[in-house]
Image (cartoon, coloured by chain):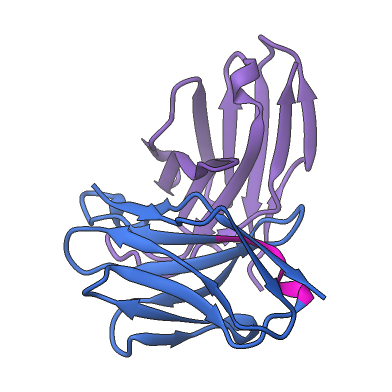
Chain colours: A blue, B purple
Amino acid sequence: AQSVAQPEDQVNVAEGNPLTVKCTYSVSGNPYLFWYVQYPNRGLQFLLKYITGDNLVKGSYGFEAEFNKSQTSFHLKKPSALVSDSALYFCAVRRLVDKAAGNKLTFGGGTRVLVKP
Amino acid sequence: DVKVTQSSRYLVKRTGEKVFLECVQDMDHENMFWYRQDPGLGLRLIYFSYDVKMKEKGDIPEGYSVSREKKERFSLILESASTNQTSMYLCASTDETRGQGYNEQFFGPGTRLTVL
């Protein structure tokens, strides 16, 4: 079965410093990996995804993520955090394709990011 | 832009009531989803629909049912609300056909349901 782990419940970072949100996964076959962000009282917004190709994926709002197959990780990064990046971040992996599972995602528990001025 | 709307942002119901949560998407997506979001548990899939009148159970379907009579609308029904169904409910849609899985899902703003 597929699973996603976000080992940190919360990450605190000062504005202007690099931000990293960790994600590891367990999946059979090639993983399709996603990051979503949830701002307060809002639904989830898509940030970026890895399907195939270059291991470094660039996404919205200056975020990027690096796919590391040997470590089964897909950490989200931003070189210089902003106060407005404070939000809840979710990593997700596509489930194995069976009769109708291709579109289903398994989500991690979420990591709250707090960027302090 | 894709828009996914949910009928209520906040809802308060009493134990035993039948509750309807509505979701509408405006981009002709085939696939729609209902999740519940609880702290530390991430999002858990309740039900999934890949076409009109077609549905599949997700990971936690107990106590819920769904209806998809039109392509743009996907309803979640709590047959008899219980306090353990107090949660944030998120609807999502995506435009890819079954078996692909590489397009992102688009989410509604969520409904925070409290069952007293």
Q: Residue farthest to the right?
A: A117
Q: Residue farthest to the top?
A: B16
Query: How far across and down, in percent of the image, does residue B40 sit?
Result: 54, 43
Name which residue lies at 23% across and 56% down: A97
Name which residue lies at 66% across and 54% down: B108
Q: Is residue A87 left or right of residue B51?
A: right
Name which residue lies at 40% across and 66% down: B96
Query: How far across and down, in percent of the image, does residue B24 sit?
Result: 64, 50
Query: How far across and down, in percent of the image, does residue A33 sit?
Result: 37, 68
Q: Is residue B50 left or right of residue A1?
A: right
Q: Is residue B70 left or right of residue A67?
A: right
Q: Is residue A62 visible?
A: yes
**A24 or A39: nearer the eye?**
A24
**Residue B59, above or below A62:** above
User: Is B111 included in the stretch rendered in magenta?
Assistant: no
**Residue A46, above or below A104:** below
| Quarter occupied by residue A73 | bottom left
Q: Is residue B81 visible?
A: no
Query: How far across and down, in percent of the image, does residue B7 sit?
Result: 74, 42
Q: Is residue B100 left or right of residue B110?
A: left
Mark count: 0
Quarter in which the N terminus of chain B is drawn: bottom right
Name which residue lies at 60% across and 24% down: B85
**B69 or B114: nearer the eye?**
B114
**Residue B43, above or below A59:** above
Magenta stretch?
Answer: A83-89
| Quarter occupied by residue B4 | bottom right
Quarter in which the C terminus of chain B is drawn: top right
| Quarter occupied by residue B20 | top right
